[in-house]
Amino acid sequence: MKELECDVCEERCEHPQVICLAKAELVSDEMAQQVAETFKILGDPTRVKILQTLSQRELCVCDLAAVLNMGQSAVSHQLRVLRSARLVKYRREGKMAWYCLDDGHISNLLAQGLSHVGHE
Amino acid sequence: MKELECDVCEERCEHPQVICLAKAELVSDEMAQQVAETFKILGDPTRVKILQTLSQRELCVCDLAAVLNMGQSAVSHQLRVLRSARLVKYRREGKMAWYCLDDGHISNLLAQGLSHVGHE
DNA sequence: TTGTTATATGAATATATGTTCATATGTTCT
DNA sequence: AGAACATATGAACATATATTCATATAACAA
């Protein structure tokens, strides 16, 4: 348990007690940062397409580029981002690299995002 | 149902059939864009903190700024972003504006994101 | 009216990010 | 070895974005 420092004496505007409570319940900087980083990765249409496509089947980079109608380099760069975030993994087979999702969590998040948009 | 145009004749690399299938199941540009936009909004630590705070209680702008230890202007700008995306709503009471979440969907997404980070 | 307070917003700045181009790496085939 | 191919990556560029500063708007108080 961390101590609550409620140095809200300088507040002239409002409600020191509520501020104190909310501060106590606020997520940590690190937590907020990590959560934001995860969402940020899902916050790009290309990556959404890549993840949604890989949620259906394993694909090699060049097939993925063909599916998305994008350059190989762009796809490869995005796969690197997704790899660093452990959202996708790959296996090598000769010259080719076969990519798939790393775990189910992301599928769930993505599905919920899609459903959120659906409910507009 | 839309027609599947599988003009993958120029592919020299691989697997035209798989490409064709994946293309058919690919989310639309608009869908990908909308989903990405939703996630992009959650992809900033300040906004994560704002949403998490508002998921617990209604707050006015200046209290929110005090809780987050940020300038009023920065908070107001972010609230604007969240308002445009219909993630938060507000009611006016005199000079003050009281903000809260617009619906539960975002709470759920956020909670799932937090849990995803927790499971690392 | 004048002054004070709460919030909103435009401009400016610094930083981050997505794509392209060129090239490197590594594998397979001849 | 050399050629062709699949993938990865660094540099460059254009665009997006988060914060700050200054100021506008609007409500209330004196």
Image: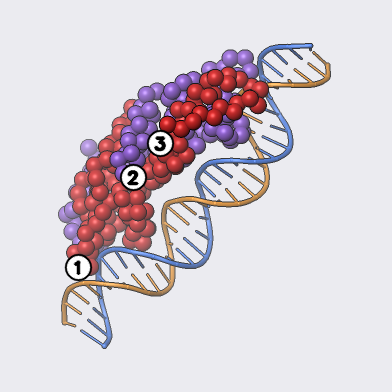
Chain colours: A red, B purple, C orange, D blue
Mark 2: few/some/many CA within 10 Å (<14, 14-19, 20+): many
Q: Name the residue tied to disc 1.
A: A94
Residue at 49% x, 23% y is A21
- Check disc 2 and report its element: helix, strand or loop: helix
Residue at 64% x, 22% y is A13
Q: Position of residue B67 (x, y in %)?
A: 54, 29
Mark 1: few/some/many CA within 10 Å (<14, 14-19, 20+): few
The N terminus of chain B is located in which quarter? top left
The C terminus of chain B is located in which quarter? top left
Mark 3: few/some/many CA within 10 Å (<14, 14-19, 20+): many
Q: Position of residue B7 (x, y in %)?
A: 24, 55
Q: Chain of mark 2?
A: A
Kindly indicate whether the residue at mark 1 contacts the one at mark 3 (C-beta within 8 angstroms). Answer: no
Left or right: B72, with A63 as reference point: right
Q: Name the residue tied to disc 2.
A: A48
Q: Nearer the viewer, mark 1 or mark 2?
A: 1
Amino acid beneath label 2: Val
Q: Who comes first in sequence, dot 1 or dot 2?
A: 2
Amino acid beneath label 1: Gly
- Check disc 1 and report its element: helix, strand or loop: loop
